[in-house]
Amino acid sequence: PMGSVFHVRFGSKRGQVYVPGDISEEGSNGERSKEAGEGLETTSKRDWHGGMHEEGKGMRVFEEVPWHAIVLQEDVCQELESSPDGLSTAEAESRLDTHGYNRLKPQKGRTLFQKVWEQLNNILIYVLVVAGIVSGVLQEWAEMGLIFFVVIVNCTIGVVQEGKAEKAANSLQAMLSSTATVLRDGTKVNIDAEYVVPGDVIFLKSGDRVPADCRLLEVTNVEVQESVITGESSAVKKHVQPSPLDAALGDRKCMAYSATTVVSGKAVAIVCSTGEDAEIGRISTIVGALEREKPNIVVQLDIIGKWVSVIVIVLAVASFFIFKFGPADASLKDSFNNSVAIAVSVIPEGLPAVIAIALSMGVTAMAAKNAIIRQLSCVETLGSLTVICSDKTGTLTKNEMTVVEVRTCEEKAELEGVGFHGSGSIHMCSGESFSEEQMEQFERVIRIGVLCNDSSISIMQDEHGNELGWQHSGSSTEVALLFAGMKVGLDQLSLERDYPRLGCIPFESGYKFMATLNQFEEGNLYCFKGAADRLIELSSHQLANDSGQKCSIDRAAWHNHVDELASRGLRVIALCMAEEKEFPDLLRTEPMTIAKRKPFLTILGLAAIIDPPREECIKSIEEAHRAGINVKMVTGDHVGTAVAIGKILNIANDDGVLCLTGQELDKMSPEELRNKVKNCNIFARTSPENKLQIVQALQAEGEICSMTGDGVNDAPALKAANVGVAMGITGTDVSKEVSQMVLADDNFSSIIEAVREGRKVWDNLTKVLVLNFPANIGQGLSLFFASFFSGLDGAPLTAIQALYVNLITAVTLGLMMAAEPPERTIMNRPPRKPRKRLFGKKVVWRCLFVSTQIVLAVIGVYAWGEKWPEAYSVEERRGEAFSLLVFLQMIYSLNVRFLKTTSIRWGIFSGNKYVPLSFLLIIGLQCLIIYTPSIQSFFEVRGLDGYQWLRMIIIMVVLFLDVEFEKLVLDRYVFPKVKPVLRKIGLRTPTVTGIKQVFRFKGAEVLPSGRIARNISLRNMTMEEIDSFRIA
């Protein structure tokens, strides 16, 4: 029939072929005639899937059949050129040469030399090294030593703070099995797992780690924990029947995958894929191939470094020629010294250390709020997040299944108390009091759930007998029923003693129920627990509420109850019973036979279960929305549950697409995916590939997004996201290694706290730049313009003094700024633009405005001191200019503390305990320098008198008031009008090149970030276009 998939055979070749239309010529037993098969060109039965019927040509096949979809086990063995008897030793050795060892290819790590070179490969470092060499040639050993000390310190900080992402591959390798039991030469042998090859027959038992991807041949009650690969928290029951062709990874029940763990049963399997070809190897390949975009802070510092280096080189070269051949007519040595002084004055030597320490302070603050940062630059990225993609279970919800409602045929009751604990009570939903008969009915329903249960709960105690809380083992659904029993006074141990178990049918996904036979006073009873839809159809009777007697079932009413509960996102369990005397052979009957028999059960009631949302997450999501951050839920759960939880959390997007499934995402084109993903906030039944698709689609739309995950399967999406967030409690080592942040408490609220801290760090880094650069530029320009005045006896500042300001004063005040508390409205403003400049128009203007005043002040006091009130020596004038530069930067820091509001307030020194400490330290050190004889000679200064102190104080007050006037007038009235004009004419602060390039060839596009759009056709390109595109 049209649309069917059937088996074909061409000689020794077998496979599956999709029939798109009528094909008349068909042989017996599904075999195709030679004429119908003409045009079928394939060398492997695994290639025979899909295709089209072409007149005169039969089938054209274009996609292979995956291992899980090949129907016959002998076909699997034939494809692998093996058999259920395994391989010979010689054949295994031959295949080892062909396929390689069963291990992951280690990622090539960087050597210490490479890491050091990355820190030194910076144009600012080059300028400093040249300046140090020149100082050495001129025998200025102190200056040379300080310059190279700065280079070494910055390099050391960079190497120490280097990320540890290369450990990801090692973590994946550690998850592989170390040994395997295989069938070689017809005998079971234990070998190292790395010697396993495709075609090997292996034996698995409870507790084993699966050594390679394999197709199961024989199974006995096998359950495999596949969370590291699929993300599913529950163990998967396995069987040998083939899975549908398009089955998701977690639904391939006939396969066992490398690095997963057998939790029960035993199996025989044949190895299909090893090493890099296995599923975990594919994940490793994706993780290794993905390259993370540079964080914005790194890009911005790179831009700043390039422009500062240009300014430094121009000023240093120009000053050399002006000092040598200009009015000053300086000697060659003095001219070189002045150029070196300008270079070290303008370069912010202490800035890398300040930024690293500021980010580290952010890391410390986040760690106190359960957000552990693995990469320093991630701190800044958090502040610019526009989208947070979060798991549901355990992150947005408690991961503690709870029975919240119980229904009988006519009544319903609510259970209070959320989570894994026994505190709480039961009450009628109507608000009425329980009658004795009603309470007995509800207890009867819950009693079935406690008896038909293989899980357990107990109270943990310390060595002194103090209660530490509850511990549990087994299915979370069954644990929820046990705690529900406690709320109505039904203790598991007491019930098992009063109603001992005589037999059991364990739960299977195939028939969706569990049954136990228990001994009651009135006779033995079967207790059934399972999927509501299955058990309702197996029920013939129900208990009447008023009499408690059996009566005919009203199936429509029960189905209505189930639909109503499911629409609220509740998981519904039916609880039933049957008398043994009516069905004495039930335990000896195949469960699938029971599932197909005529209705025979008596349904007692329904238990509605939910994994409740975290109360704090609801508030955090509201805060995220106020901050302009969109929250999306990405879960492997069912659509109904995902939507219900999404509505409770206020995530559901009523105006756009309510929910998309993983299968729907797989069918979309890249363009459709980008449009849909942006307008949908709930994604259900998603795979690891879907997570990666969602991240890349959001990034293509210009979003800065984070993604949470806990399994190996989540590693590609975590690495691709701007901020990958791993779970600290449930997360695997692999997910933690590729992520930038780990949640110690697996709580979504911790992400929002980290965002708040990230925004604070960006604000404080901006303050650091606004504080440091005017002083750097001011002292550099002071030396530069001093070369124009022939009357000045020497430069107002020396290289040693400039280094001191940059390393001691600037670093001290910079760290003070890094410790500034966040503004109260920090989470009430939208996220920063994705590539917002750290050195923007406002910073540029403030640098020009303040540095101009610093230049006038430093040169002014240096020249003034030559004549009034008396002729001061060069050292005394230099001491005044040096001290004024330090104190101007100190007083200016008070302006910077409050960038957008006035600093003239009573609390100007409060709110940050480091402000008074920094001021006292700077003043104390400066007095020590200018009044201690042994230090005076090193800095080439002398002590100051009263007139010089008075001049400095007046100039400091004037600068402070000038900046406050500028904030009051320009920020409030001028800039709001000027910015639109600048934006309209296209005047922007420069990027690295100032140019954004977009290459287009036959519909393909290279995005500015360097990522390449999908579905690129090279068919119609010229070779020149292909070469250009490859280079781009």
Image (tube, rainbow, N blue to C red):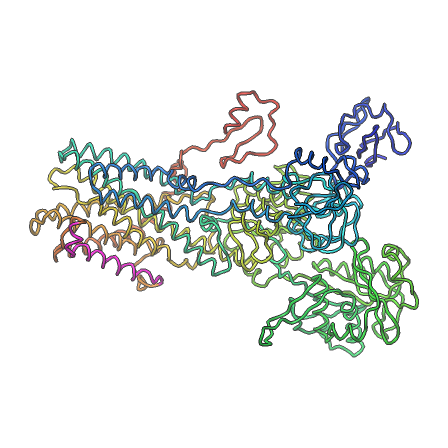
Q: Nearer the viewer, residue 743 or 22?
A: 743
Secondary structure mostly taken by the magenta-highlighted segment of the chain: helix
Boundaries of the magenta span = 911-937
Q: Nearer the viewer, residue 406 or 454?
A: 454
Q: Residue furthest left?
A: 870
Residue pictured at 44% horizontal, 46% vertical:
162
Is 605 situated above or below 337?
below
When asked about the image quadrant of residue 245, the answer is: top right
Residue 659 visible in rendering: no
834 sits to left or right of 57: left
Tally the marks: 0
- Queried whether the magenta region covers residue 925, the answer comes back as yes
99 sits to left or right of 890: right
Residue pictured at 75% horizontal, 77% vertical:
434
Residue pictured at 83% horizontal, 70% vertical:
518
Which part of the image, by quadrant, shows the N terminus?
top right
Residue 698 visible in rendering: yes
- Queried whether the magenta region covers residue 550, the answer comes back as no
107 sits to left or right of 522: left
Q: Position of residue 882 (x, y in %)?
A: 19, 50
When asked about the image quadrant of residue 80, the answer is: top right
Is 663 situated above or below 407?
above
Q: Position of residue 774 (x, y in %)?
A: 28, 46
Q: Position of residue 890 (x, y in %)?
A: 26, 55
773 sits to left or right of 686: left
Q: Position of residue 984 (x, y in %)?
A: 41, 37
